Image (cartoon, helix red, strand yellow):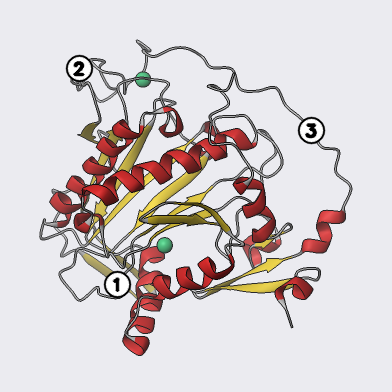
Amino acid sequence: MKLSDINSEPHRRYNILTNEWVLVSPHRTKRPWQGKVEAAFVDSGISYDPNCYLCPGNTRAGGHQNETYEHTYVFTNDFASLKPDVEVDGVFEEGLLKSAVEKGLCRVICFSPNHKLTLPLMDAQDIERVVRVWQREYLEMGALDYINYVQIFENKGDTMGCSNPHPHGQIWASRFIPDEPAKEHQTQTAYFEKHGRSLLADYLRQELETKERVVVENEHFVALVPFWAVWPYELIVISRAHLQHLGQFDESQIAAYADILKRLTIRYDNLFTTSFPYSAGIHQAPTDGKDNSGWHFHMHFYPPLLRSASVKKFMVGYEMLGNPQRDFTAEYSAGVLRDLSEVHYLHAS
Ligand SMILES: [Zn+2]
Ligand SMILES: [Zn+2]
């Protein structure tokens, strides 16, 4: 059976990274829908907000004052979910109840001093500074003996529960390896041990044969809608080389990574002419000093929007209780994103 035949009927797709499934129901896209076209998001024009706790020189809620920074700026989260100064021998076990004390570090990274400059609106050169800070933080935090995993992520937009519009990301570094990377550690390591090759390198090779799901590519990276995508416009950015982590990036890979981030986030903003919300994050090798040869650097983008700047996908009902489900296919989404302009709508004349 060919994919085009399968694609007209309900089917399941397998996620090679997490060993999970997604239900795809393309026939449901024939349901009537009154396409809504919304007014473009209007540029607020504020580059400095005296009430923003992330703008340069301002005082944060915790009482600390930001430096009058000129580029990317990092500080330790005043209300961190993980703290470095705790004793971790506190394991609690009673019958079937089990818990363990954890320690770690949480940092906030302001991408730019400019309050309104999201990644797609920043110069490629300034995005490179962000990538260099990610690289430095991964290596520095990962080198601490009690840090075994460094999770770099961005939560963008108030629909994602982001509390401040000033473009920023976060880094949570922990002693434990969180569940998502732990699942991907297992699948990638098992594949590498069996075949002696990277799972994602082989996957990328197969995707590049047809390019059906490829959205943007450059010398060192490819951004595509994964075959098993759950979110309507989900993307994965994969390095062409089998790199385990940011620490191995050279100058040309840093530049290419910044380039692909800019190009894909511009497409996202252009899709519904809005500052496109998402949760995005890097998955890379744990910093536990063990053999992580199977790991292949990649970044996930999970955007919630479905049909417009205000209509989002809900993960409810069957999805909470059974499996995630989507209507239009990954191939459809990739085609839509591929056809969009790489000139940001706010800059288009
Ligand atoms: Zn600000
Ligand atoms: Zn991943």
Q: Amino acid at mark 3?
A: Lys
Q: Where is residue 134 drawn, in percent x and y?
A: 25, 45
**Residue 6 visible, this orientation:** yes
Q: Say above or below: 340 vs 335.
A: above
Q: Which residue is mark 1?
A: 93
Relative horizontal placement of residue 251, taking residue 295 as reference (left or right): left
Front residue of 47 and 79: 47
Can you tell me whether the CB of the residue at mark 2 lies under 8 Å from the nearest atom of ligand 1?
no
Q: Locate ligand 2 by image quadrant.
A: bottom left
Q: Residues within 10 Å of mark 1 (few under 14, many from 20)?
A: few
Label located before the other in sequence (2 or 1):
2
Q: Which mark is residue 68?
A: 2
Q: Residues within 10 Å of mark 2 (few under 14, many from 20)?
A: few
Relative horizontal placement of residue 247, taking residue 160 as reference (left or right): left
x 66%, y 52%: residue: 335
Q: Is label 1 or label 3 in front?
A: 3
In which image quadrant can residue 147 be found? bottom left
x 60%, y 48%: residue: 338
Q: Secondary structure at mark 1?
A: strand
Q: Which residue is mark 3?
A: 36
Q: Secondary structure at mark 2?
A: loop
Q: Say above or below: 274 vs 202.
A: above
Q: Amino acid at mark 2?
A: Thr
Q: Say above or below: 267 vs 101.
A: above
Q: Amino acid at mark 1?
A: Glu
Q: Where is residue 33 drawn, in percent x and y?
A: 85, 43
